[in-house]
Amino acid sequence: MSVDMAGRVFSALKAEPGLCAIHLAGGEATLRLDALLEVVRLADGMGIPMAYLETNAAWCADRATTREKLDALRQAGLPGLLVSCSMFHNEFVPFARTRTCIEEGTQVFGRHNVMVWLPHLYETLASLPDEKATHTLEEFCAHTGMRLDNPEVPELYSVIPGGRAPEALRNCYVPQPAAAFRGGRCHDLLRTTSHFHIDVYGNLFTGLCAGIAPGNIDDLHPAITPEAFPVFSTLCAEGPHGLMTMAAERHGFEPRDDGYAGKCDLCYHVRRHLHATGDYPELQPADYYED
Ligand code: SF4
């Protein structure tokens, strides 16, 4: 996200009387530390309450540099951190860096302002051999005695089986036919704005449903009608099975023979099909749907 776009997002959020606090996430926002510092200063200067920055700690190679960067972020106005801690991150980030980020972060922001996500995986990762190395998922499973093709593997990190996650973890899930998801409406999840995200283009996502934009920073409160937002409205009323039926009738969608990891997996498959028609501008951003 550009600093300019961040400023536009903050202006839109400033007009929200119910705004509690924002969190900054990615990707990995520390990849462009100078821009991140500017964004934090901007939020602070505009009076936008901040909660924390999410980070994968890949940048925490040594304590001195980590401390320097965390100090700079705190001085810019950042109040806390959320540090990702999982076997999926450990495939790319040595645990030593996760530990450094958490320990130095605690020094800088205080114990109550550093969240470990998820804390129950911290000790398990700490027990892996050579914390300066990364470990494959196979190595993690061998170490913990888990089978790789086990639903408990993604559940350990509360992975939502949507987007690209089921593609990477397909063997962990017991596939279910599309018909198994008949009747499951998504009204409550899609209507929740207690936790929401705004993407790099200014699109609003409610709940945790990425790729469905019922608003954007130019209009965070549009009138949601079935005509204007057919995908959002159908998912609210009838869930992904209802959306599948609509996509089959209008656009020849056919479900996969080998089934789905969960309802969000079916939802993503149907939405990709709908996005390819070009008829559904609420399906944003385009790169979420394209290979
Ligand atoms: S099925 Fe679709 S709309 Fe429902 S919770 Fe999953 S991603 Fe969101």
Image (cartoon, grey):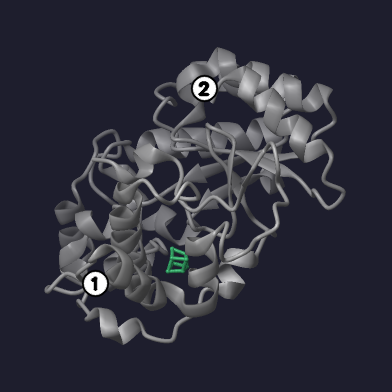
Image height of 258 relative to 134, above or below:
below
Image quarter for ligand 1 equals bottom left
- Quarter location, residue 44: top right
Give the position of the N terminus as an image quadrant: top right
Q: Residue furthest left?
A: 257
Q: Residue at x 20, y 77 (%)?
A: 174
Mark 2, secondary structure of its residue: helix
**Amino acid found under the numbered disc labelled 2:** Thr
Q: Observer-nearest residue: 88 or 206?
A: 206
Ligand 1 within 8 Å of disc 1? The answer is no
Report the side of 59 relative to 199 (left or right): left
Q: Residue at x 42, y 48 (%)?
A: 85
Image height of 210 relative to 161, above or below:
above
Comparing labels 1 and 2, the label whose residue is closer to the camera:
1
Image height of 19 relative to 30, above or below:
below
Residue 263 picture location, percent across and down: 36, 73
Query: Does residue 103 appear in the picture of this structure?
Result: yes
Disc 2 residue crowd, few under 14, some 14–19, many 20+, Cα 10 Å: some
- Quarter location, residue 262: bottom left
Q: Residue at x 83, y 53 (%)?
A: 18
Q: Which residue is mark 2?
A: 66
Report the side of 13 relative to 111 (left or right): right
Report the side of 161 relative to 101 (left or right): left
Q: Which residue is mark 1?
A: 260
Disc 1 residue crowd, few under 14, some 14–19, many 20+, Cα 10 Å: many
